[in-house]
Amino acid sequence: MSAVATDLAIRARAVAKAFGKGDSRVVALHSADFDVPCGEMAMLVGPSGCGKTTLISIIAGLLARDHGELSVLGTDPSALSGDKRTSWRLKTVGFVFQQFNLIPQLSVVENVAVPLVLGGTRMSEAIERSSEMMARVGLKGRERGSPIKLSGGQQQRVAIARALVNSPKILVCDEPTSALDGATGQSVMELIAETCRGPDRAVVIVTHDERIFRFADRIAHMDDGRVDRLTDRDGNPLDGAAPQGGAPMEQHA
Amino acid sequence: MRIFALKMLFGDSAKFYGILLGLGFATLLISQQSSIFVGLMSRTFGFITDTPQAEIWIADPDQRYLDDNKALRTTAVQRIRGIEGLEWAVPLYKGLIMVQLPDGQRQMSQVIGIDDSSLIAGPSRMLEGTLDDLRRSDAIIVDERACRREFMLKRPPEGGPPRKLRVGDVVELNELRAEVVGICKATQTFQSQPVIYTTYNRAIQFAPPNRRMTSMILAKAAPGEDVDALCARISERTGLSAFPTDAYREKTLQYWIRETGIPINFGTSIILGFVVGVAVAGQMFYNFTLDNLKYFGAMKAMGATTPRLLGMVSMQAATVAVLGFGLGIGITSAFGLTVPGDRLAFRMTWHIPLVAAGAVTLICVASAALGMYRVFRLDPADVFKG
């Protein structure tokens, strides 16, 4: 992939996005620049409404950008048509949601198997691979139980197992620790850090939880639809960061 | 994903059983009420069905339906026999006469007097004795159903416990002696009175005297004769109404459908069944889809295409439709098999399950379509909005 050649898993330049039309038009992203090198864990932080969720949704191929440039492992998901983008998401992106979104009627291992089955893997093989993934996240022996009988931390581990079971290159996490207590949140982050990093992978996490900043390789501070500054986990400005604050969206519009 | 769709459905047991019961109840109400309605309507022309020998039914022009007794002059049959193109024509008496049983009980009964010589229009099935036994003096044949019910002797003349009326017993019809010579199985009519067969001439002796004693005339066309043309000829020559069997059955049926409130009563129950299905099962299935919307959203984000998710909802709807219909039609069938036919008119024709299936399909398709619309409109980005 070209992304590996450039060592950037994610490269966003002047990405802009607005919702609605006319008087009800709201600009969520004015002009965001954001890079994530391969093998790194990046965090998006900032006040509510600053555009974190919009940016992560565009990177993950859930939303299409209005303007700017985007490359995720060499592909611009916004340029793909609906079905192709869905297929790209299935192969490329793993999701960890704030509310876990585990299906209560399915067993734990069946929840983990969902992305594999969506990808066309036979059920028996999907269950086998999902069981292996559950062992990796420390939930061996809980395969047949119901997810609602697990603790919050265990449910988030199941969600992580589900996100990783088909080996996605990009892991996107939305507030993965917000529903967890401090200790459980730390252990979940340790799990993400140890299982998701690799030379051909990248992790993007949206969070408000400062306690997990220590896991980040870079932290993008967002405000008013832009990446305001880029720091390391200790708050020091990062050298060689992508140029920030491109042309405002209004100029494109 | 089909297996996951089914597990999601069965896993939400409260909603699943609620939907199932709603659809089952709707199917039960629609099919059971329809079957009883069809059963009742079939009884209105039961005598016509039981008399396959007759091709032409001749009656007073003002007669509205089979049991609307507007008697003809006893000479009418002679006039009919004079019309060319008929193989035979026989008189029929059909009327209510008071019967006194051997133990003194009195019961108004429907007496059918059939042609003395040919015995055409006799009971279709004899359980004891033969139709020819009617040629004996004072002979009558009694319906088996009446023997078990209205003609049950509470104080038999010979003493002992109550027993059914049986062959050899002597009863009185309008205070005239009659002897039971046979027991038959007659198709139950819409009227609930016991049915007694005898010959025409004996019947008009039992009945109160009147110049008009012939209830109707049954006839058969000669071979090669056009029945419709013959009916028209009879009407033209005699001023009486003449109908081919099918038309007469339809005329009787249409009277009950158009002139009575029966279809409205049953129709209300059937519509109620449909409304219950929509209100309970349809609403519950839609809510089930809404409850799962966030999971469908998560799956959409993870890479499930919209057609795939719509397929899951369709499969869930089809499953509850089949199971709910099966439950309802199964209970209706068990009801029909269990309840005695002489107590309740019940006739499930092949159309009825089809109509019930159509109603259930409509309920499921409508509720699934609403749910599918929500799934179709689902924005996968919403999963990040909590």
Image (cartoon, coloured by chain):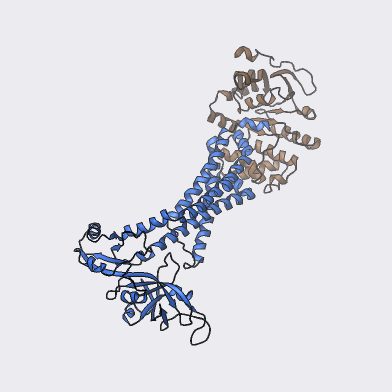
Chain colours: A brown, B blue
* Outermost left residue: B84
Which residue does the image show at 63% across and 15% down from the upper left?
A249
Q: Is residue B316 visible from the viewing direction of this image?
A: yes
Camera-nearest residue between B230 and A153 = B230
- In percent of width and height, residue B263 lies at 46, 54
Which residue does the image show at 40% across and 77% down from the upper left?
B174
- Image quadrant assignment for residue B351: bottom left
* Outermost bottom residue: B158
Camera-nearest residue between B240 and A174 = B240
- Image quadrant assignment for residue B241: bottom left
Q: Quadrant of the C terminus of chain A?
A: top right
Q: Is residue B65 above or below residue A33?
A: below
Q: Is residue B304 visible from the viewing direction of this image?
A: no
Q: Is residue B373 above or below residue B71?
A: above
- In percent of width and height, residue A208 lies at 76, 28
Count every numbered label the image shows and give the total.
Answer: 0
Q: Quadrant of the N terminus of chain A?
A: top right
Camera-nearest residue between A149 and B21 = B21
- In percent of width and height, residue B238 lies at 24, 61
Q: Is residue B119 above or below residue B258?
A: below
- In percent of width and height, residue A44 lies at 72, 24
